[in-house]
């Protein structure tokens, strides 16, 4: 058994991905044998991969409207049309990914992998864009929003300390009676101290605790 046929479920059966990859690899091998003249895998190039992808179009099930079609660019056309059925871009993109892996699993060198050729990547990209316009379907990937990093712990602590000190001084100026305040002064000092701790805890970013 080749490496492409290995892997899969715990009960010894190949996974759905491995089974599909094996079928795709066998289909491509049959295509090379039926090619005129027959092609050897070692002599296969990106151009031959493009021929294979275009050959698969006859088995497609996706309606791709021509530029002159009245339904061009409509995702839900109201009626039938004579536009041909094609292979969807997503299906071909997944197929190339499986064949790229199968090529190397069956002894192919990564630097000579025809499924990783630049011409194949450009073809798939152009096919994606053209089908998106014809079918009115967007294939743009969602961009992840970058998380804003928290401020440095040292800077946040320094700012908090300054504001806390100012609050402490303002509270002392509001204490009546100078030193004769006694318990009232102590109570205010305790409130100021508690306020400092509370403010300090609220200003420290979460990153400081990790």
Image (spheres, rainbow, N blue to C red):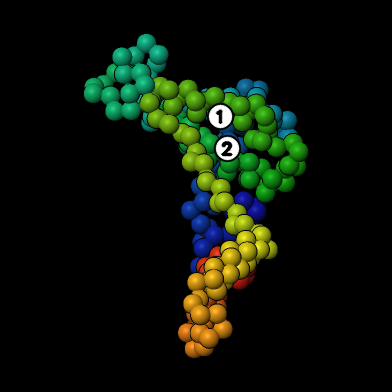
The spot of residue 134 in percent (x, y) is 40, 22
Who's the residue at 51% across and 80% down the image? 177
Secondary structure of the residue carrying numbered label 2: helix
Front residue of 182/190: it is: 182
Front residue of 89/32: it is: 89
Check the picture and name the quadrant holding the N terminus: bottom right
Which is more foreground, mark 2 or mark 1? 1
Numbered tag placed on residue 115 in the rendering = none
Q: Quadrant of residue 154?
A: bottom right
Give the residue furthest to the top: 68
Q: CA distance from mark 2 to mark 1?
A: 9 Å
Drawn side of residue 57 relative to residue 83, left or right: right
The spot of residue 130 in percent (x, y) is 47, 22
The residue under label 1 is: 124
Who's the residue at 58% across and 26% down the image? 123
Front residue of 61/156: it is: 156
Drawn side of residue 166 relative to residue 108, left or right: left
Query: Mark 1 or mark 2, which is nearer the start of the sequence?
Result: 2
* Residue 202 visible in the snapshot: yes
The residue under label 2 is: 96
Q: Quadrant of residue 204?
A: bottom right
The spot of residue 190 in percent (x, y) is 52, 82
Give the residue furthest to the left: 78
């Amino acid at each position: 058994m080749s490496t492409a046929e290995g892997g899969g479920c715990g009960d010894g059966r190949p996974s759905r991905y491995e089974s599909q990859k094996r079928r795709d690899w066998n289909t491509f091998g049959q295509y090379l044998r039926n090619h005129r003249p027959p092609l050897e895998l070692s002599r296969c190039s990106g151009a031959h991969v493009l021929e294979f992808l275009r050959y698969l179009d006859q088995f497609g099930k996706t309606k791709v409207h021509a530029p002159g079609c009245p339904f061009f660019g409509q995702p839900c056309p109201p009626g039938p049309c004579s536009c041909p059925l094609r292979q969807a871009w997503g299906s071909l993109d997944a197929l190339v990914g499986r064949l790229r892996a199968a090529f190397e699993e069956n002894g192919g060198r990564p630097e000579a992998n025809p499924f990783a050729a630049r011409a194949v990547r450009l073809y798939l990209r152009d096919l994606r864009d053209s089908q998106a316009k014809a079918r009115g379907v967007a294939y743009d990937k969602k961009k992840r929003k970058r998380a804003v990093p928290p401020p440095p712990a040292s800077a946040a602590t320094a700012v908090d300390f300054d504001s806390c000190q100012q609050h402490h001084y303002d509270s002392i100026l509001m204490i009546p009676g100078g030193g004769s305040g006694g318990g009232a002064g102590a109570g205010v000092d305790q409130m100021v101290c508690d306020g400092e701790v509370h403010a300090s805890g609220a200003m420290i970013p979460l990153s400081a605790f990790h």
